[in-house]
Image (cartoon, rainbow, N blue to C red):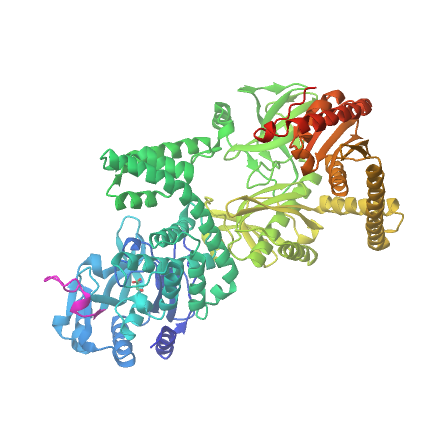
């Protein structure tokens, strides 16, 4: 039975028993406590705990899962995988142990017809209820039911959350498959007893302290590994021999030239590559991008490990993307998301492979040298400093260094390495602008803010409601001092009771504006929040005097703020459009929101095409014109996440958050300033799109007035061009085309004229040749703009005059160009073009030289050209006459004697 039929059989079986078929959820769980989806129950965690209600009480799924806990065993055993498909049925307070056991047994033994004599059962040590069901109701002999401890038969998805005792169905693959040790029995780590189905009786919730609390209802969570049951059904010894893996392994063998069965070691590598390629393809398909942290790191590590095993098989070329291709072909029927993102998945894998290969090349050279040296010194450990340098400077993965060291019988100095890592972490933390949890900004770590906060308390920000407000000056700060007043002309920082000024945060820059009293006025140029709710307004008193405790009117520069709002709302719309066009992986990685100008950084692996940029820009503008309301509200973090609000990765949020909603298409957690409606944005124009690092791109765009100004500037340019080109704007294209074709035909014409001028000049030069001893000598001044054209004259003359010496000079930009040439017979006769120039170039204030048959030189006195040519004549005569005499003795040397 192939795996396609197996999947269907499973779902049909449970659908017939009133289970709702739910699609697999993403490998990226909607759960901050989990890195990856590692089980079918992950998407139902909240349903189990009672926090979430669904309108069905039974469900069945085929869930894609990634588990890295057993990564070291993948390939070593017949059954471990990082990526697998879990066939699961679930009950939410509906049926319990009896039905789940009965149905599992029925499906396996009746429908799939697995040989009962090969099946064994495990239960949790004191679960007498399950024992009774298995033994009395299912008729399993008690010798085949094993009671196991918490380690084996109590299941939980993580340190906290829903969990419970479980019961497993195991399949005996036969003695020859196992370790063969005398004590080999259920629970042995070897491959003999294959766990195929785990039935979890989810009745508890574990809290942070590890205490178990009864859940409001008892639930069922089962999981059967598709790959394992496929191996049983297809009667093959390992999951790698099933139809799920065969086409992938075929490609691994093809690219490496190594087949399964050649050696234990190469088998492991082949299996690792196939497994990791499956995991990588699915992770990328779910929006994970290779990086150095979190999920991105898991993905990177899987890809790198696979590539490294490729190298162990002797593959030095990029190959991984081909294996990914095989995964896509094998799996895309069952998982549409793979087909949809196929190109993206391939490209991301390819990029990562390229990057890693170049890292490897550098790192391997170094590590091999180090290991060689250590071995010759009979050392047993690779120093932590070496491991750290490889990691820090070359990006060489530590696990790889460890593996290579191990292969050579060395270990790495883990402790020393950890120390260095810790030191580096400490340094980079110190560099961060925000100092740890209390939120003090680094560049404002001045004690003064602490004092102000302690002494005068926090300020209230009221800028989401109003643009100006009556308030009181709490403190005036200058440098490290708190002042009681600020005089005209002074630059100070002001802190108010409450303020409408937005302090720079979340990419949105700080507000500007004015502070007024009856007799004074200060202009605020920047607003910063140096500690939570310590809002500092930096500015200058332009008239009068401001006093502490004084009542003032604080007014934000409304025009500027409105332009900032335009850019901020536009940023959200852009984020939405990018995800729509590029995929869910295109997530915000940073932003800058200024008046009518924005910069948006996001994760994506390659440059956007012209087409993609156009599409994004059009979508954004459509949303502008469609006139969508923008709403902001405060809600619990939980509700916000549930409603699908986009949170920034790695950002810490409190219990209550502000959600900004644009129409019904964008929902983000955001504390910034926004418009009431998208139409106020006016217009959006994307200016640039570029890379700013691995897998991170940046878009810069204008909106509102600045977008208008941009277009109006472009229009002005077009108008000016029309005037210059004596056309009107509408006809500009035609006009330019006509002009271009005129220019082209004139260029042709010119070339022809030049060619004929050159020909006639050459024939003039030929007739100017003087004969000496049967040789023709041409010494002339010509019009040539550069050395190249001068050389071509010389070449032509040498062709036309088969026994000749030529020296041509020209003047270009006030400088002298000289080129000399001689035909080979004359070179034999003693003429040397290089020596000729060495002699005459000094006369025009230059130097140069070259080969006997061709040489060139420059000079700076054009007025001396005639004299130089004169001298050349004398020189050539000498060469020819002396050369005649010296022909024999010079046969061994090449420097002609040029003295007279
Ligand atoms: N959650 C259990 C497991 O992963 C059963 O589905 O094994």
* Image position of 725 with respect to 472: above or below: below
Q: Can residue 349 be seen in the rendering of this structure?
A: yes
* Residue 735 magenta-highlighted: no
- Residue name at image x 50 percent, y 26 percent: 449
169 sits left or right of 499 in the view: left
319 sits left or right of 630 in the view: left
- Where are the magenta residues, as a range? 170-186
Q: Can residue 225 be seen in the rendering of this structure?
A: no
Classify the position of the C terminus by image quarter. Answer: top right
Occupied quadrant, residue 576 = bottom right
The one of 697 and 744 positioned closer to us in this rendering: 744
Image coordinates of residue 677 in percent, x first then y, are 66, 53
The kind of secondary structure the magenta stretch mainly shows is loop
Image coordinates of residue 856 in percent, x first then y, are 70, 31
Image-quarter location of ligand 1: bottom left
* Residue 171 magenta-highlighted: yes
- Residue name at image x 33 percent, y 37 percent: 369
Image coordinates of residue 420 in percent, x first then y, are 34, 33
The one of 679 and 868 positioned closer to us in this rendering: 868
* Image position of 436 with respect to 871: above or below: below
- Residue name at image x 62 percent, y 37 percent: 500
Image coordinates of residue 151 in percent, x first then y, are 21, 56
The one of 87 and 435 positioned closer to us in this rendering: 87
Query: Residue lying farthest left?
Result: 182
The one of 784 and 580 positioned closer to us in this rendering: 784
């Amino acid at each position: 039975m192939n795996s396609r039929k197996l999947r269907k059989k499973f779902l049909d079986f449970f659908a017939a028993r009133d289970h709702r078929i739910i699609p697999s959820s993403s490998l990226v769980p909607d759960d901050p406590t989990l890195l990856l989806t590692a089980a079918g129950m992950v998407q139902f965690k909240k349903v189990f705990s009672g926090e979430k209600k669904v309108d069905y009480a039974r469900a069945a799924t085929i869930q894609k899962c990634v588990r890295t806990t057993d990564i070291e065993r993948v390939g070593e055993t017949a059954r471990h995988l990082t990526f697998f498909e879990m066939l699961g049925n679930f009950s939410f307070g509906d049926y319990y142990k009896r039905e789940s056991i009965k149905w599992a047994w029925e499906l396996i033994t009746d429908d799939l017809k697995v040989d009962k004599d090969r099946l064994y059962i495990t239960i949790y040590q004191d679960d007498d209820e399950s024992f009774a069901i298995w033994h009395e109701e299912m008729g399993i002999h008690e010798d085949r039911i094993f009671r196991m401890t918490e380690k084996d038969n109590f299941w939980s998805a993580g340190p906290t959350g829903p969990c419970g005792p479980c019961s497993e169905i195991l399949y005996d693959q036969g003695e020859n498959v196992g370790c063969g040790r005398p004590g080999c029995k259920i629970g042995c780590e070897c491959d003999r007893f294959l766990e195929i189905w785990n039935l979890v009786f989810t009745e508890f919730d574990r809290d942070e302290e590890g205490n178990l609390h009864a859940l409001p209802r008892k639930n069922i969570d089962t999981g059967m590994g598709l790959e394992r049951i496929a191996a049983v059904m297809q009667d093959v010894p390992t999951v790698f021999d099933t139809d799920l893996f065969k086409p992938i392994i075929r490609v691994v063998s093809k690219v490496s030239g190594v087949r399964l069965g050649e050696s234990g070691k190469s088998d492991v590598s082949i299996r690792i590559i196939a497994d990791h390629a499956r995991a990588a393809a699915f992770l990328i398909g779910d929006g994970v991008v290779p990086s150095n942290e979190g999920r991105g790191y898991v993905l990177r590590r899987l890809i790198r490990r696979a590539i490294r095993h490729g190298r162990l098989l002797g593959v030095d070329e990029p190959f991984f993307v081909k294996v990914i291709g095989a995964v896509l072909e094998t799996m895309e029927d069952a998982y549409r998301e793979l087909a949809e993102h196929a190109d993206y998945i391939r490209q991301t894998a390819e990029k990562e492979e390229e990057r890693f290969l170049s890292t490897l090349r550098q790192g391997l050279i170094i590590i091999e040298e180090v290991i060689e040296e250590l071995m010759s010194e009979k050392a047993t450990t690779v120093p932590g400093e070496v491991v750290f340098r490889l990691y820090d400077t070359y990006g060489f993965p530590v696990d790889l260094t460890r593996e290579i060291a191990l292969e050579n019988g060395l270990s790495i100095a883990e402790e020393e390495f950890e120390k260095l890592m810790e030191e580096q972490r400490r340094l980079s933390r110190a560099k961060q602008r925000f100092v740890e949890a209390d939120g003090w900004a680094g560049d404002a770590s001045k004690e003064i803010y602490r004092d102000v906060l302690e002494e005068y308390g926090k300020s209230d920000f009221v800028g989401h409601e109003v643009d100006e407000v009556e308030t009181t000056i709490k403190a005036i700060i200058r440098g490290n001092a708190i002042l009681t007043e600020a005089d005209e002309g002074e630059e100070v920082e002001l802190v108010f009771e409450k303020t409408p000024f937005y302090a720079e945060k979340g990419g949105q820059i700080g507000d500007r504006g004015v502070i007024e009293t009856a007799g004074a006025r200060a202009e605020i140029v920047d607003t910063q929040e140096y500690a939570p709710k310590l809002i500092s307004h930096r500015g200058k008193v332009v008239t009068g005097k401001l006093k502490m405790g004084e009542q003032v009117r604080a007014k934000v520069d409304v025009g500027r703020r409105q332009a900032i709002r335009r850019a901020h709302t536009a940023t959200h719309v852009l984020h939405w459009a990018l995800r729509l066009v590029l995929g869910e992986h295109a997530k915000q990685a940073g932003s800058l929101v200024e008046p009518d100008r924005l910069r948006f950084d996001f994760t994506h692996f390659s440059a956007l095409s012209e087409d993609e940029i156009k599409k994004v820009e059009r979508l954004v503008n459509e949303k502008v014109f469609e006139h969508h309301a923008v709403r902001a509200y405060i809600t619990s973090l939980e509700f916000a996440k549930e409603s699908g609000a986009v949170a920034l990765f790695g950002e810490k949020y409190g219990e209550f958050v502000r959600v900004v909603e644009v129409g019904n298409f964008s929902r983000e957690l955001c504390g910034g300033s926004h418009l009431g409606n998208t139409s106020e944005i006016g217009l959006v124009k994307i200016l640039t799109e570029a890379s700013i690092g691995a897998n991170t791109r940046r878009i810069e765009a204008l909106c509102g007035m600045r977008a208008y100004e941009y277009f109006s500037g472009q229009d002005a340019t077009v108008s000016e061009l029309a005037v210059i080109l004596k056309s009107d704007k509408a006809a500009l294209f035609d006009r330019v085309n006509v002009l271009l074709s005129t220019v082209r035909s004139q260029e042709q014409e010119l070339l022809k004229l030049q060619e004929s001028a050159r020909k006639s000049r050459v024939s003039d030069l030929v007739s100017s040749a003087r004969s000496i001893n049967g040789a023709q000598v041409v010494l002339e001044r010509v019009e040539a703009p550069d050395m190249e054209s001068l050389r071509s004259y010389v070449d032509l003359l040498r062709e036309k005059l088969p026994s000749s010496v030529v020296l041509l000079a020209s003047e270009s930009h006030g400088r002298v160009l000289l080129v000399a040439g001689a035909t080979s017979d004359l070179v034999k006769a003693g003429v040397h073009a290089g020596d000729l120039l060495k002699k005459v170039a000094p006369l025009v204030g230059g130097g140069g030289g070259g080969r006997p048959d061709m040489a060139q030189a420059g000079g700076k006195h054009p007025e001396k050209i005639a004299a130089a040519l004169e001298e050349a004549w004398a020189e050539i005569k000498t060469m020819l006459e002396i050369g005649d005499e010296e022909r024999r003795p010079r046969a061994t040397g090449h420097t002609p004697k040029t003295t007279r």
